[in-house]
Each structure stands twice: as structure tokens, then as C-alpha cells.
Image (spheres, rainbow, N blue to C red):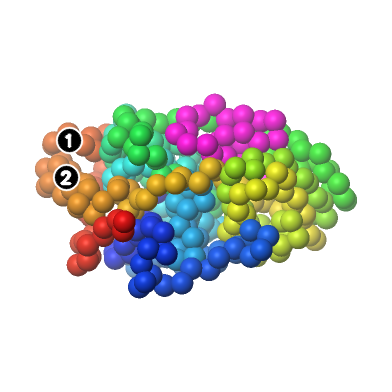
Amino acid sequence: MSNLEVKPPETELVDPAESETTPPIVRPDATGFELLTPRDVPLGGPRAMEVRRTLPQRARSLIGAWCFVDHYGPDAVARTGGMVVPPHPHTGLQTVSWLFAGEVEHRDSSGAHAMVRPGELNLMTAGRGIQHSEVSTTDTTTLHGAQLWVALPDATRHSEPHFEHYAPPAMEVRATGAGDAATVRVFLGSLAGSVSPVITYSPLVGAQLDIPAETSITLDIDAGFEHGILLDAGELSADGNDIPIGDLAYFSTGRTTLTLTAGASAVRALLIGGAPLGERIVMWWNFIGRTHDEVVAYRSQWQSEVIGDATRTGRFGHVDGYDGPALPAPVLPNVRLRPRD
């Protein structure tokens, strides 16, 4: 999904200690736990689709290589107009589309044409550059899900764009308490004995967790990973920390287990994680690069090759089958983004 903000904030990920002017960052507590609250972001025009964004933000910009988390719905399509995102570009990242309700039609310039459905992963690797469109189908009455991005490491961020689809099985996980076994759907990486076959370019995990009310599970996790839990529904505590619905809980490296306990209502949550990326990135609009000049060049190519002349097939290719023009890039801010040494 595109970042449709008219004035997207400039996000430069650097060590805050390297700049005296950088605002103070909220650090995890002594146990390595941190709670990230979302901000509401309207995507598009007057009937904008509202999303709740927890990454990136000032408190934290990355969890492993995960760099962007939007959570939306449940939205009545008759009221909101659903999702209508014209062709738009991406560079240097993977988009992870995951639905709880509804259906979205995906088209991209790698030639992929697929439906995003609940419980099924659509993974698009932008690499050196891609464009895609996303439109909720006419049969969709309620739209509810999450859109996440993964930053590609420098060694692979110029790879050829491609698309993968995977429907992970619902694996039972032994639980204690009032409920039956919990279920885990692993769409990236491995967890609870389940392994996703899709391609990742850094060590990652991504899964949907469904836990019955008054029930607890303990997951074995990679101690070298940072982890995040986005609560979509229910009442949840993780290692004794309560997580409000819509918030993203962060857990630092060093943990080998994570105990999740559902309260009076059943839990649905997304677990993400990965090894710390260890690289500086510059993210603006739908582009991820390493320098200000690189992002400026991406925007210039998009405007000239796609917006200025839709017949050209340059870095971003062409989306077949979408009836309408591509999305112009916003105006760049009057500030230079540069890595701090």
C-alpha cells in the first residue's frame, strides 16, 4: 500500500547520539519492553481511508528490518469507499499485505496479478524499483488488515523486483488455561515449528497469533531478534506487560521465550521480528534509499518516466490492467536529508 500522505515526513534513521539537535528518544524499560502508540493517518482525499501507524515514529523506527506498520479497519466500505490506490512506486523494500477481512486486487509491474485474502500473504519485493496498484473488490463490504514494509539490506536492495503469494497453515500451539490450543500462522521466517517458504533478505519472522480467552501460550523465540506485537483484537499481556488494542509492543533482543496471555476476550495479534538491520536508511514517501540524493533521483525518475510519459518503461516498469493514471509523487520538502557520520 502506498503512503498517500500529501506531506510525508522525512524519516532519516540515524543514531540519535550523533546529533545534539535530535529530540530525545524514549528507550525501552529495564526489561527491554517499550509500547508504541499509533498516530491516525488519513490516506487520500475527503473520503480518506484512515490507518493507524505505529512505525516509523520518533520513539522507534525499526524492529529488525521492519520499518513501516499500518493497521486499518474494520471499515465499512460503503462508508469509506474502500481501498483505491492507483499505481505508485517502491524502492529498496518488501511490502507485506495481510488481511483479517475483505479482499484486495493487486497488480504490479513484475506482471503479478493476485488477490489479497484473509490469512494469505502477498509479498512484493520492490528491489531496484517497482510500481503496483491495490483496489478492494466489489464484493468487499468490510476491509480490515495491516500493511507492513521490510527494508532490504544494502547488499540486496537493487535486486530484481518480484512477487510471492503464500497461504500459511494454521498450526496449533499448546496452551494453558480455559481455552483450547492457540493457532499460529507463520507467513515469514519460522516460529513454533512452522516455516514459511517465501524469500527474505535478512533474518525475519512474521505471524498471526490467535489465542482463546483466558488462555496462555509460551513461544520459543530467537534471542538475536527484536520483536514487536501488534494487537488487533482482544485483551493481551506479553511477559506481564498489558498491550492496548492498536498499540505495537516492542521487545529488545536477548529473550528466548515470550509468554502471551489472553484476558476475558480472545486475542488476534501480529508478531513481527528480526535481527537488527544495522544500517542507516532514508525513507520518504514510498522510497527507501541510503542518501537524500538517491531519494531525489527516485522521485525524479518516477515523475519523468511514469507521470510524464506513461509509455516509457524505465526503473518502475508498467502496471497492466489498471484503469486510470498513476499517483504523482508529493513535493519534496525544502530540507536535505543526509547521513550523519
Count of picture labels: 2
Q: Is residue 41 above or below residue 329?
A: below
Residue found 57% across the figure and 40% down from its top: 205
Crowdedness near tag 1: few (<14), some (14–19) or many (≥20) residues, C-alpha within 10 Å: some
Residue found 33% across the figure and 54% down from its top: 283
Residue found 82% across the figure and 43% down from its top: 175
Taking the magenta stretch, the answer to whether it contains residue 324 is no
**Residue that mark 2 sits on:** 301
User: Which residue type does callout 1 highlight?
Assistant: Gly
Report if residue 314 is visible in the image. yes
**Residue that mark 1 sits on:** 314
Residue 73 placement (x, y as % from top left): 53, 58
Residue found 38% across the figure and 57% down from its top: 14
Report if residue 212 is visible in the image. no
Between 130 and 47, which is closer to the camera in this rendering?
130
Q: Which residues are magenta?
A: 185-210
Between 193 and 317, which is closer to the camera in this rendering?
193
User: Which residue type does callout 2 highlight?
Assistant: Gln
Report how far apart the C-alphas of labels 1 and 2 lie in the structure. 8 Å
The kind of secondary structure element at disc 2 is helix
Q: Is residue 222 above or below residue 280?
A: above
Residue 52 placement (x, y as % from top left): 49, 62
Q: Is residue 104 above or below residue 40?
A: above
The kind of secondary structure element at disc 1 is loop
Residue 172 placement (x, y as % from top left): 75, 36
Of the numbered discs in the image, which one, if any, rests on residue 135? none
Residue 164 placement (x, y as % from top left): 45, 30
